[in-house]
Amino acid sequence: MDIGIVSVRYAKALMKYAQDTKTEDSVYACVRMLEHSFQNHADLHAALDNPILTIREKYSLISTAAAGDAPVSHEFSRFITLVLKNGRESMLRYICLAFLDLYRK
């Protein structure tokens, strides 16, 4: 399946979920920070693609990249869990970019 199609589907699902729970702004802040981390740390993408890391370790890495030492929102946490459960972590940056685009529209 095409990366663009999958990324946009996940981004739309996250946007809909954030709108339903009225947490668009907090989810946007986490996604924006995660995208910023992807830009500044090229090894982040490589770490997420590493099959040796467990889902728990990848979750921790993503949470830290998105919020630093602060806890991530419940909605963002559930979304990251879904992405990892479905093995879509390699598409996470594209999902972030699609979500940021949707939010700004």
Image (cartoon, rainbow, N blue to C red):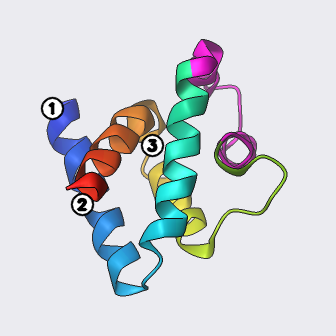
Q: Give the range drawn in magenta.
A: 40-65
List the single residue furthest toward the right: 69
Badge 1: few (under 14), some or many (20 or more) residues near its Cα, within 10 Å?
Answer: few
Instruction: Say which amino acid is labelled 2.
Output: Lys
**Residue that carries the numbered disc 3 in the rendered image:** 87
Q: Quadrant of residue 41?
A: top right
Q: Which of marks 2 and 1 is in front?
A: 2
Split into 4 quadrants, where in the image is the C terminus?
A: bottom left
What secondary structure prevails in the magenta region? Answer: helix
The Cα–Cα distance between marks 2 and 1, rounded to whole angstroms, is 16 Å
Q: Residue at x 75, y 42 (%)?
A: 57
Q: Residue at x 62, y 23 (%)?
A: 44
Instruction: Say which amino acid is labelled 1.
Output: Asp
**Residue that carries the numbered disc 2 in the rendered image:** 12
Q: Earlier in the sequence, mark 3 or mark 2?
A: 2
The Cα–Cα distance between marks 3 and 2, rounded to whole angstroms, is 18 Å
